[in-house]
Amino acid sequence: MSSSPPQQSRPPPPFAAAPPQNPTPAPAFPPSSAFSNLQISRGPAPPPGAPRSGLTPQAAPPAGFPSRPSSGMGIAAPPAVRPFPGSPPAPVPPFPRAQAASPPFGVPPAVAAAPAVAMQQPRPFGGPPPGIGGPPGAAPPFGGPPGSAAAAPFGGAPAPMSQPQQQPPQFGAPPPVAMMSQPPPQFGVPPGVGAQPAAPPQFGRPALSGPPAAAGIGSSQAMPPSFGSQQQQAPPTFGGPAPPQFGRPGAQPPFGAAQAAPMSQQAPFMGPLRGNAPAFGNAPWQTQGAGSGAMQPPMRMPGMPPNTLGQGMPPTTPTMPYSPHAGTQVSTPSKIDPNQIPRPMAETSVIIFETRQGGQAAIPPAASSEFIVKDTGNCSPRLMRCSVNQIPCTADLLTTSGMPLSLMVQPFSLPHPSEEPIQLVDFGDMGPIRCSRCKAYINPFMRFVDQGRHFICNLCGHSNDTPREYICNLGPDGRRRDADDRPELCRGTVEFVASKEFLVRDPMPAVYFFLIDVSMNAVQTGATAAACSAISQAISDLPEGPRTMVGIATYDSAIHFYSLKRAQQQPLMLIVPDVQDVYTPLQKDLILPVSECRENLEQLLESIPTMFENNRVADSAFGAATKAGFLAMKSTGGKLLVFQSVLPSLGVGSLSAREAEGRANISTSDKEPHKLLQPVDKTLKTMALEFAEYQVCVDVFLTTQSYVDIASISVVPNTTGGRVYYYYPFSARSDPAKLFNDLRWNISRPQGFEAVMRVRCSQGLQVQDYFGNFCKRVPTDIDLPSIDSDKTIMVTFKHDDKLQENSECGFQCALLYTNVYGQRRIRVMNLSLPCTNMLSNLFRYADLETQFACFLKQAGNGIPTSTLLHIREEVTNTCINILQSYRKYCASVTSSGQLILPEALKLLPLYTLALIKSVGLRNEGRLDDRSYWISLVSSISVSLAVPMVFPRLIPIHDLTSRGDDDSLIPSPLMLNSENTHEDGVYLLENGEDGLIYVGNVVDPTILQQMFGVSSLAALPSQVVLEQFDNELSRKVNEVINEIRRQRCSYLRLRICRRGEPSGDIFRSYLVEDKAPGGPSYVEFLVHVHRQIQSKLT
Amino acid sequence: MSEFLDLEVQDGIRMPWNVIPGTKQDATNCVVPVSAIYTPLKPNPAFPVLPYGPLRCRMCRSILNPFCVVDYVAKIWVCPFCFQRNHFPQHYSSISESNLPAELFPQYTTVEFMSTAETGPVAPPVFLFVVDTCMIEEEIGYLKSALAQAIELLPDQSLVGFITFGTYVQVHELGFGLLPKSYVFKGTKEVTKDQILEQMCFFAGKTKPTTGVIAGSRDGLSTESISRFLLPASDCEFVLNSIIEELQKDPWPVSADQRASRCTGTALSVAASLLGVCVPGSGARIMAFIGGPSTEGPGSIVSKSLSEPIRSHKDLDKGSAPLYNKAVKFYEEISKQLVHQGHVLDLFACALDQVGVAEMKVAVERTGGIVVLAESFGHSVFKESLQRIFQSSDNDLGLSFNGIFEINCSKDVKIQGVIGPCTSLEKKSPLSSDTVVGQGGTTAWKMCGLDRKTSICLVFDIAKKDGSDAISQSTSNQFYFQFLTYYQHHEGQMRLRATTLSRRWVAGSGGVQDLIDGFDQEAAAAVMARLVSFKMEAEPVTSWYQSSGSMAMAMASAAQAFIDISNGLTELTEMFSDVIRKLDALRSALHVSPPGTIVLADFDPVRWLDRALISLCSKFGDYQKETPSSFSLSPRLSIFPQFMFNLRRSQFVQVFNNSPDETAYFRMMLNRENVANAVVMIQPSLISYSFQSGPEPALLDVTAIAADRILLLDSYFTIVVFHGITIAQWRKAGYQDQQGHEAFTQLLQAPQEEADLIIKERFPVPRLVVCDQYGSQARFLLAKLNPSVTYNSDNPAPPGGDVIFTDDVSFQVFMDHLQRLAVQ
């Protein structure tokens, strides 16, 4: 990578020019331009943008109508508006995004047509059969229109045809913006005027950033454009330095003038550089890495006020003295300017990322940014990314760096709609070609020798005979002549059709079994009704095929099965009263093809709440019911969706109110409270292992108002590849909508069944362990009864030998699974990264978000077995060790008084601080909240890991006055209380919850417009966000819907007000503030610095 | 004879000895025990029903009766049993010689008391249907229609519950309106009453009381929770009909080499517990409809693999029916539970193969249940029997519930026990003998279910020893008996029927003629039949030796068998069939099945009967010693040997032609029927129809067969209409439809009409076989006839007659031997 930067500079300019000015440039572009071309030649770059912009608006609407884009346009609007099921009045548009998008750019019809053409290419999931693509993608996370249309939101999955539509949604509004913005930058590389205008509007957030570079204010604005350009230009590698990351804060005068200088420097490079590579240093830095102080400037935080460039660190020293104690902040203000410390920077423009360039692995863009991947040999970073992008040759080197070596694998992550689908390769009966020794699958890094008669495995080095049918001559470059025609030889990710040897049995059908708690509390709180209604709506979107099967049961102190196979007759209710020794009342007819029982099922779901209206049974046999559900689907496997509302008090796996006991214990003697975060016993674990063995995946929806012992319950989903959904305290008013959307996304997102996954790596490394939601029976493989687009598995490695410098280290993840259509596939993802002996390279190529996700998961993993205090210390120490290592070995030249942060990891302290203050690690909080947090973290993806602890805070009271900024979402604010004013309304979201903070002196008209209430007092704490007929309300809804789309999560909205507990919750997320639970950001930096210094001396 | 019938009409009782041998020794010598067959609910419009409660003796709790000595002046009565003097209470103050309460009328030795004041209202009867679903569709279809009909006939106020079972047990919640709803229990696991209480939500919303009995609405359960499962028939007709309508074959798959998995035992246990929870102590019957053997869970009788046949008598004898004893034990437990709760188990077993009646017998019999055995649910035996249960007509069964039967008698008489459909309440008293027969060791029995024909056989012991005190007591040479039956009348109220009787006793050798005069040979035959059946079941017919395969033991046993055989030859038991049985035993002894298990007969019913008959004839016959030809019997005794001859050949003794289920069924019927019917079972009646004469009884002999006769055989379980060959030919030629042959038409109809009459009265409905001479079905007749003409007889059959292919001895041979042995 590093070498490449210079070259790239050229491409960007050409394209950029055109689009920038016109807001509606899209139409102008040739819609059909192939995306693939883009990256390589700059020429193509613009087109992509264009199509998108064009598409987006339209696409969104069409979501519902995959095949005919043109018509879709017109229609689009209505479907989009479709209210969420759960929320009665609220006309929440399903794909707000889409809507929003469309209006702005009135795409001419012509354009729309264009997309249609393009569509075919993009198949996201690209299964061979047309049908395939559809399913996975299909499900829009939130109540979009049914059917394939649904897919739109996430765009990735849907069938090939639908893609065009998808695209639009995904890119949604933003892309277009990006486009425009980009151009300017490119041209205007210089911070020139042109750039400025473009930038601000486009990126809602102040792109600012250029932390390193951008000095002046004016410059800052200019910067953004530059990024934009970068992104598109991506190819140019040189990655602008970390710009993106700094982003947000950038708006403010982060690094002062000094930075300006760098800016200018970069400017030249930047354009060309890989725009996306936010995290990594740019060329300049590299050099620094070597030791030059110059590089570091951006990062140093502490001391340096606005003043000097990074280089001029001297000021640092001062910090030390003051910082240590609480008073620091106050005392140090003069020394540390809170405005200059590193903060994440917004990144809105779309980057095009080629996974390998010039025969080398490219550095992936930040996980949180929007980018389009072009698979040129390595797999997409969405699928698999490594904590360091160059692999240390020795264990010592890795240890010295203090960084983790791990891979985050998200095999079904949603692709960008513009990305090419993963190609399918069918080797027929022969099955995929594999290394005979290590069984690695054929991949682009296997080297063919001897006129192609042999190939050498890139993982184990074994020389294999090429099967006769597969022999092909080599070209002069030593590659097979057919390499570019064979996806398995030129793509980082391919899917193989599984041959017979991979089939133990016929691929299983897609089975969904619903289990609903109907005990007294569940019924009375409305949870039962909510679950029934959610299921009823969700199944209406299930594909009709004979392979989609459903079943349902309810339970209280007994389990009630329903036999739906009764043509015209009512379903038959069969009760299994024995909750100690569970069984199913029938062998068949409990699970039926959805086409055979849809009506019966819907009717039943409608009557269940009435049927149990007067239920007086307070007990709930969760464990037994789950077991019974499992037995019903034992022969096929499938998904078991359990809606539980109270603490399981009866039957197998019953639990006790440990929380209360725990409290009692704490008051008397603080003996190991973390034990309460461990499962109470092994019963559920044993059950879960059995479930997993029979390919049953359990998802648990906890619609509760009390303690339910998530620590114990979560074992089941965590072991079977499912997850816990938690609605606490459940509100029949506001939660049904989320419940429905969660459920719908759950069953409609891209997913695979009965999966087995193994990661292989080059000799010299070995897999140490896997983390995530799965079941592991043998050390090498993990079993995933179900794997979906939201699940990430962390794989850690350790050295068992040295790696050769200048060689590449290969990773191959193979996932054998059955798709929704009952086809058995092997998805193989390859990543080949260079090895290095240079510590500085490790730091330069560190992937902050991946590393942070890794720390997050490890912390989550540790909580149940250790005290919180200890975990927090560990987390802090990890951070300190890394920084100290950098300080010691890579920046030793500078004075010890400076806190020097590696560019790539400059946000590590901030995130670490956020982690320490997170729900999982802070002292206060309910047990269940913490357990839920732990369970969530175990499978969280890289892109959601940071927001999880470091949420996004945006003002929403002034959305209407934002001018014509093109980005939907206003730029986030720093997470400190100075940014929230009592006359404003703010939304804080972490991908799971959405807290709407309403100031105490908010203008009533805002309240009226936004919530439909006339005064603060009338505002309920549980909100169903309705869309009222006014600009503000519409915008708020647009924003929230856009966030939902981004996060693939429907956010649990809550109103927070000062002086109420809800306000405290809100405050607890303002991680930069000093709080009882932890220091302020500045204080923390000081602390870190001190620690480093003490270690150094 | 007729006087015995009169006595029966008056009190519903028949006794072999109406003059009682007065001492223990005498009684023993009389061979046939002093006993009585009593029909507690025998209907008789002459029995007065008194609308008040009875007066009881202060001492022995016996009831005021016509045998009491009354002092009208002192207003005192003396109990004939304990001689206690009791004062009449206030409301009897107007008593005088001319103003007697009904219970003192001499002719009212049997009266009924019905006092609502004492008992209060009684819960309506409960019918809990337990229906097997492991059947072929066709059978299910038959069953459905039969059930649907039965449901319509249910009395409106009676409560109904419904359980189906196959692999699992389903308890249908009839009171749930929205959906068909049922609780499903695993067939392999027994369910206790507590589990039922807990698992079926009887405490929904309430906490379960920690102590005390919880059952029924009186003891802690809400009527609401009970009425989910047991509803008035009129309220749940619709639900019930739709459930029946939708009855389907058990959905669990059965592979071709397997039997359906059927958890009869668990289903019955669930049913019993459900009733125990909901309506303990009030009348309820479990009506089980079973279409095959139980293969699953407790009480299963055979494994699922079809390669294993269902146990036969031989298996039982040899002990090679591994599940048998376990199953019997299980059903014993169920019977205990049911008896405790006062509930009845009825069994409707309809299958070509056995279903396990032999194992379930204990539960059915002890609770006084009805049993119907047929080949198919489509068979008239089943269909009509089921209807009869609910039909109200002259012949209705008068099903009553919750009976308690008590006995009082003079102190020289003790009660050994009862053979019949009841259970001992284990109420020991000086009256209960140490020797126990049947349900003994008590003076009170529970009769959970009883009807107007239910008859029990009481076996007495004469406790009085020879000696001086006999003379001192001779002031009264009467024995008194009082039978009290407290029961829930089918109309709902509780009633008490009291029968008091007195019999003269004689002692010493002088009384022989008196004894003969008082001998009721029919009753004696019935008693002997019950006794022999009971002994065959109770005293293991076989015993076992385990000798780890030692050949020596095997040989010893074989030798023993030989001895038995030779003895048999010298005795009357030389009958061929017996020889064959012996040979069987010998064979099995020699073959020494695997670990050298050998079987020897312990109790030989045939020999036991023979000895009894010989002794009786020796004692009461008229003969010169050692002169067989001089032997003669009084008319009072003359038919008895014939009864015994037929009893020896009957299904009760010769079980090897029948399956254990059939045998169990026959014996259950024998044990609950009155004397007349028992006699028909032992010795079928044969009526002949011909042009020459009207219907006339014919000798139960092969010689009764003639080409121009129609025979009507009533063997109780089967009614055979047998056309002589000529008649059959005429009928086939269609003469009966031709003019001028009305006489023939009538001749054909006459036996049919008679058969219909019998069928109408009988329960369970007998099976009707219409057959022709030389036809295959004719075997039903031939099997019952005395084989006086066999294939190797010297005298050939007359033309048009028939020959029986058997080696059994004929009655003539039997009598010859009897005479020879009796005079020795």
Image: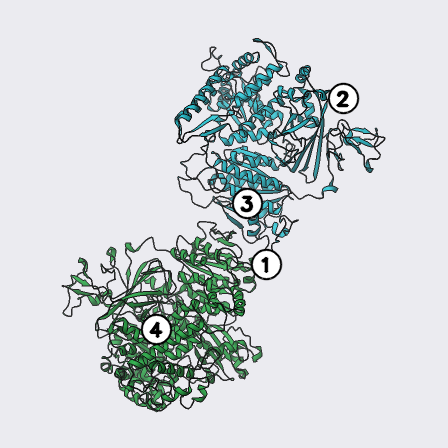
Chain colours: A green, B cyan
Q: Are marks 2 and 1 in contact (CB under 8 Å)?
A: no
Residue at the image position 17 percent from the left and 68 percent from the top: A479
User: In the structure shown, which secondary structural element does the residue marked by tag 2 occupy?
Assistant: helix
Query: To which residue does mark 1 refer?
Result: A614
Q: What element carries label 4?
A: helix
Residue at disc 1, secondary structure: loop
Name the residue that disc number 3 marks: B270
Residue A215 at x, y percent in the picture: 34, 89
Q: How far apart are marks 2 and 1 (CA)?
A: 76 Å
Farthest residue to the right: give it: B73
User: What amino acid is at disc 4?
Assistant: Thr
> Do the residues at pointers 4 and 2 share their chain?
no
Q: Nearer the viewer, mark 3 or mark 2?
A: 2
Judging by the rendered image, the residue that carries numbered circle 4 is: A850
Q: What amino acid type is highlighted by mark number 2? A: Thr
- Tell me how far mark 3 sits from mark 1, CA to CA: 26 Å
Residue A200 locus on image (x, y percent): 38, 85
Residue B525, percent from left and from top:
60, 22
